[in-house]
Image: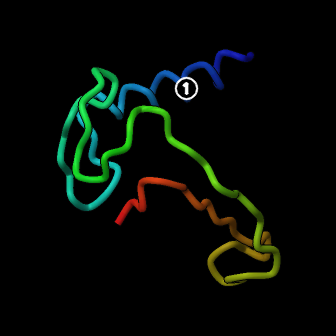
Amino acid sequence: MTNSFKKIENDSLNMLNECTLCNRNCKVNRNNNELGFCRASNKIMLAKASLHLWEEPPISMGNGSGTVFYSHCNIN
């Protein structure tokens, strides 16, 4: 694993020390087995990630965009 991926992993896990992933901003420490409003643990479940080629050309400069769908926590 490269250093940049390790940094991303560490930064992502640190975000869960005071969770603000959704607009409820419950700020629980999911890394300390606390459960917020969504009742999700620190094991974020990814349902699907996919590219949307040819979408939003003015914004993506013709490169497309992507979507990420989570399971369990609805992040809204």
Task: Report the side of 46 relative to 17 (left or right).
Answer: right
Task: Report the side of 24 relative to 52 (left or right).
Answer: left
How many numbered circles are shown? 1
Q: Residues within 10 Å of mark 1 (few under 14, many from 20)?
A: few
Q: Residue at x 27, y 47 (%)?
A: 20
Residue 22, compared with residue 16, is above or below; it is: below
Counting from the top left corner in percent of width and height, residue 26 is at: 18, 47
Q: Which of 37 and 67 is in front in this view?
A: 37
Tell me which colouring the rendered structure shows. rainbow
* Kind of residue at disc 1: Glu
Image-quadrant location for residue 4: top right
Counting from the top left corner in percent of width and height, residue 15 is at: 35, 34
Counting from the top left corner in percent of width and height, residue 74 is at: 42, 62
Residue 13, compared with residue 67, is above or below; it is: above
Q: Quadrant of the C terminus?
A: bottom left
Task: Report the side of 65 relative to 37 (left or right).
Answer: right
Looking at the rendered structure, the secondary structure element under dot 1 is helix
What residue is shown with label 1?
9
Task: Report the side of 27 relative to 62 (left or right).
Answer: left
Residue 71, compared with residue 2, is above or below; it is: below
Q: In which quarter of the image is the N terminus?
A: top right
Q: Residue at x 65, y 15 (%)?
A: 3
Q: Which of 62 and 7 is in front in this view?
A: 7
Counting from the top left corner in percent of width and height, residue 68 is at: 61, 60
Q: Which residue is drawn at 34% across and 33% down?
A: 16
